[in-house]
Image: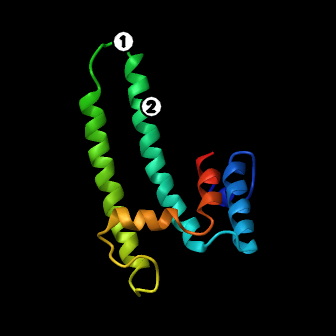
Amino acid sequence: MLFSVFVPNRHNSYAWMNIVFLVSFLLMGKIAPYAILFGYFLETLIIGVFNVFKMVAASRYDGSGKSIGFLVLFFMFHYGMFVAIQSLFVFVIVGIDGQTFIKEPFHIIENYRGILSLEGMTYVLPILIT
């Protein structure tokens, strides 16, 4: 069972194609390695945004007529805290030597601005979103 993950087949072909594209762009010098690493962290944020839209869409068709506003805010707060703490850990580990664009791990917004300006991020995000 575990071995089947490491062999391309019809169940994991999309993940393998993502890997092939990202590694080929990396080898061609179009993408910085940090862009791939942080692209997956941005994918976590994108999944959270899509989940909010799915919650709102599902509440319209459940037939109960109850408001889902509190649950959406509850999810956004807790998911946001999860992403913030996860980001802090990564920013501390990546910026520990002081040689990267991350100077202060607690400046989360500035760090994500730096991430979005990484070389090759314009290639990484569309691959991960689709």
Quadrant showing the N terminus:
bottom right
Q: In the image, residue 129 lies at what x, y percent?
A: 59, 48
Q: In front here: 2 or 92? A: 92
Q: In front here: 88 or 29? A: 29
Whether residue 98 is situated above or below residue 122 in the rendered picture: below
Whether residue 99 is situated above or below residue 54 in the rendered picture: below
Left or right of 33 on screen, residue 24 = right
Looking at the image, which residue is at 46% across and 68% down? 114
- Return the mark for residue 63: 1
Quadrant showing the C terminus:
top right
Could you tell me if residue 2 is visible in this image? no
The answer to which quarter of the image holds residue 101 is: bottom left
Q: Earlier in the sequence, mark 2 or mark 1?
A: 2
Left or right of 86 on screen, residue 26 = right
Q: In the image, residue 88 lies at what x, y percent?
A: 33, 68
- Residues tagged 2 and 1 counted as in contact (Cβ below 8 A): no
Could you classify mark 1 by the number of other residues whose Cα lies within 10 Å: few (under 14), some (14-19), or many (20 or more)?
few
- Which amino acid, mark 1? Gly
C-alpha separation, residue under disc 2 versus residue under disc 1: 16 Å
- Foreground tag (2 vs 1): 2
Looking at the image, which residue is at 54% across and 60% down? 39
Whether residue 129 is situated above or below residue 36 in the rendered picture: above
Q: In the image, residue 102 lies at what x, y percent?
A: 41, 76
The answer to which quarter of the image holds residue 120 is: bottom right
Left or right of 19 on screen, residue 74 = left
Looking at the image, which residue is at 46% across and 81% down? 100
Query: Which type of secondary structure does the marked residue at label 1 adopt?
Result: loop
Query: Which type of secondary structure does the marked residue at label 2 adopt?
Result: helix
Could you tell me if residue 64 is visible in this image? yes
Q: In the image, residue 26 lies at what x, y percent?
A: 69, 71
- Return the mark for residue 54: 2
- Which amino acid, mark 2? Lys
